[in-house]
Amino acid sequence: MASLFARLGRWLARLAGQGHSCKGQNRAVSVGFDGVELVRQQYQESEERFRRLLESLPRVAVQGYDRQRRVIYWNQASTTLYGYSAAEAMGQPLEDLIIPAEMRDDLIASHRAWMEHGRSIPPSELELVHLSGERVPVFSHHVMLGEHTDSPVMFCVDVDLSDQKRAHRDLDFATRFDALTCLPNRQALEGQLNEALETCLVRKVGLAVLYLDIDRFSEINDALGYEQGDQLLSQLARRLRGELRLTDLISRVSSDEFVLVFLDTGQCGEVYHLVSKVQYAMRQPFMINGVERSITASLGVSIFPEHGNGARELIRNANVAKNRAKLDGLGGLQFFQRHHHDELVHQQRLVEKLEQAIERQELELYFQPQVSVASQRVENLEALLRWKPHDSDVFVPPDEFIPLAERSGLIHPLGEWVMEEACRQQAAWRAAGFRETRVDINLSGRQLLRANTLTRFEACLERHGLAPQDVGIELTENVLIDAASRVLEDLRRLYHRGVRIAIDDFGTGYSSLSYLKHFPVTSLKIDRTFMQDSPIRPADRSILEAAIFIGHRMGLEVVAEGVEYQDQWRLIGQLHCDLAQGYYFHRPMSAADIPPLLERHTNRRVAAS
């Protein structure tokens, strides 16, 4: 922009110089009358072209000033920019029109320095004054014509920077603030928090960082729509701000996550008091489109200086504590503890290893038999995933790596491997003559989120030449409740084809018994928690007995999990349970140990066809 003004200034000077040169030439050289008129006409035409140029620039305000800084030229763009018409501006001193009071003395001094000593005014960004009193941001360039004559003229060329300044402010807001709630974003919060930490060090006081994550917010968006979800977030932001003291900080760090910073905290009891105020605010219903909505949030807290010295570390540790709180259920609260971080690091390393487990052939299927209570024969086999990393001699417990696979998304490739390996193994056993035992595999809710999971299961059966009765699937009741209508339709199709579908861990979910009649299932697997003390606790026995009774009345096969002692075995026999699974009979075993077991239990082999 400065180079543009420089070129314009040189043009102004050249045009002015052309006129003065022509006049001098007229005095020095004897020419005819026609020649003088021609020169005068060319000069007038040149001046007119220049004036038309200045008037045609809608966003370039040009003003001319005489030796006393009085207006002698004022184009239309100047009227647009500063509000004065040309008639109003003519003859008025520059400093009385558009120069702020605090700049007037400096302007007059700079103008005189140029007139008397030739020190030009450098181009710069300024804020000048509109007729209304509002400030106008401009880039201003000055050109002096006839500088060494008795009638010097100063031209000011001003370009309106309002749009650029507005865009800069918008960009600055967008990079530092959340557009929906107008709260600082994570980057801005980190800067504010680091400044607050410096103050805490000087004053030798503490602060607390609270990480808030709305529970199941994605489901709220799905159920109510994004517009109502945004209304909820806006209301929550206003409510949280209302719980803060003047010195406290708040930020929206992601779609459904907020961070609050309580400054100048002393005893731990004060932190609990501040957190409890937030919890109380969360418990009050939100009014969304005239309907009351209640939500919960998982909270994590880190404290300075115990849990970190920098903004990022404190926010990260509060987030770690929040993730730990999520494991405790809805609305949980956890204060950061160092072992939380150590566990997180350990889990991340496990995930990195798990990503390569299939490629390194570290996975293996074990099978746990389900035994007929009446005949004590092995009827079915549940396939269980086992993982032994290449740098370890022991298996990683499934209850440790399966949740990690769920959260990281690795459950999809692992589930595909289990499906393929179970079908391959069952086809091999069928080919070896073992044709009466079914293999069941577990499908998680995360797997069923993929639209083609059950279709791929059917394709896998066909690829290995298996019948629908050869491989069954196990699902928890919560998975069935949350399943989309498309998934239920696919399950019904499998059900009618003869695929066995079991509800695993029955009794531990959130369903009511009325849901059972809507699910396409063939079996109930009673969770081991009801089996554990059933021989000695009447309440557990009653639940066990009721589950078996309900399953049979609905025509379902009932499997008791976790049978480990003879008393439990006798009890499920008295209650006429169909199948039993547990250490009392068989622990999970490798695929190589299954054929001898099946031979002992069937006492026969069907010849391979």
Image: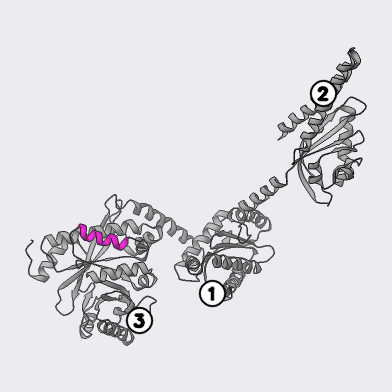
Of residues 299 and 457, the one drawn nearer to the viewer in this rendering:
457
Q: Which residue is mark 1?
A: 294
Q: Is residue 128 visible?
A: no
Q: Give the magenta-colored segment's residue range.
A: 449-465
Q: Nearer the viewer, mark 2 or mark 1?
A: 2
Q: Dot 3: few (<14), some (14–19), or many (≥20) neighbours within 10 Å?
A: few
Q: Which of disc 3 and disc 1 is earlier in sequence?
A: 1
Kindly report the distance in space between the C-alpha atoms of the residues bearing marks 2 and 3: 101 Å
Q: Which mark is residue 513?
A: 3
The secondary structure type at the circle numbered 1 is loop
Q: Identify the image quadrant of residue 198.
A: bottom right
Quarter of the figure with the N terminus = top right
Can residue 564 be seen in this snapshot? Answer: yes
Q: Are the residues tagged 2 and 3 within 8 Å (C-beta)?
A: no
- Which residue is denoted by mark 2 in the rendering? 42
Residue at screen point 91% across, 16% down: 27
Is 313 colored magenta in this rendering? no
Give 391 or 103, whichever is nearer the viewer. 103
